[in-house]
Image (spheres, coloured by chain):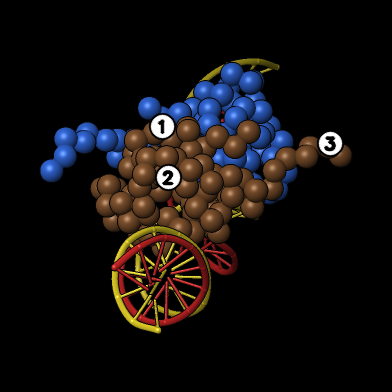
Chain colours: A brown, B blue, C yellow, D red
Amino acid sequence: MSNMTSMNKSEVLKIIGLNIKRIRQEKGLTQVDLVGKIEAQIDTTNISRIEKGRTNATIHTLFRISQALEVPLSEICKVD
Amino acid sequence: MSNMTSMNKSEVLKIIGLNIKRIRQEKGLTQVDLVGKIEAQIDTTNISRIEKGRTNATIHTLFRISQALEVPLSEICKVD
DNA sequence: TCTTGACTTGTCAAATATGACAAGTATGAA
DNA sequence: TTCATACTTGTCATATTTGACAAGTCAAGA
């Protein structure tokens, strides 16, 4: 038995999604702008789903987003 | 045209894997210890693959690992 | 109203992460 | 050598991410 009151999956994904959305908007970028800055192909569909916390993105996808946003990956991953 | 000399996928995964391995060993934990501390089921197979950079883990998996290691998720995600 | 831009959501196929199990490697101790 | 521990790797089935496209919602203007 533990007294852990940790965040669940859905909460983590939502926070990370909001991090991305906040940073993107602070930079004055639309989702289309963002995917335009990403080297490999990516879709606004996926950006939207990640920002909404509807998908459990892989770290490489988040890394590519962090590069397009010009922030460290760790910035996007701040959930605590 | 850009002058980006960004890390590729393989490099990112390797760095994150080494972060996890380093932190785990600093805490004196084996992979078996680590999975024992994770709430939901996870396998040492997956821990090993992530630590070796052989798999592109989802953020939720990394989050669960960060909880077991008692470090912020962002600590694991430091690649820059 | 109509249009445009920004975003969301549904569906699909393909790729791959995950958990599970088995088997293999490596190291160190007895 | 033998054994135990720790870790790696292969394979499998299942689930889900991803990229792509279409269609839908919503708000702001003309």
Mark 2–mark 1 Cα distance, whole angstroms, equals 16 Å
Circles 3 and 1 in contact, beta carbons < 8 Å? no
Most extreme residue toward the right is: A1
**Marked residue nearer the N-terminal end (3 or 2):** 3
The amino acid marked with disc number 1 is Pro
- The residue wearing badge 3 is A3
| Label 2 chain ID | A
* Same chain for the residues under marks 3 and 1 in the image: yes
- The residue wearing badge 2 is A25
Numbered disc in front, either 3 or 2: 2
> Residue C13 appears at what percent x and percent y?
37, 76
Is D8 situated above or below A51? above
A55, C18: nearer the viewer: A55
> Residue B45 appears at what percent x and percent y?
56, 44
Most extreme residue toward the left is: B1
Residue appearing at x 49%, y 27% in the figure: B19
Can I make out residue B80 in this image? yes
Query: Residue D16 occupies which quadrant of the picture?
Result: bottom right
Is C26 situated above or below A24? above
Residue appearing at x 41%, y 44% in the figure: A24
| Label 3 chain ID | A
The amino acid marked with disc number 3 is Asn
> Residue C28 appears at what percent x and percent y?
58, 16
Is D30 situated above or below A29? below
Can I make out residue B52 in this image? no
**Marked residue nearer the N-terminal end (2 or 1):** 2
- The residue wearing badge 1 is A72
**Marked residue nearer the N-terminal end (3 or 1):** 3
| Label 1 chain ID | A
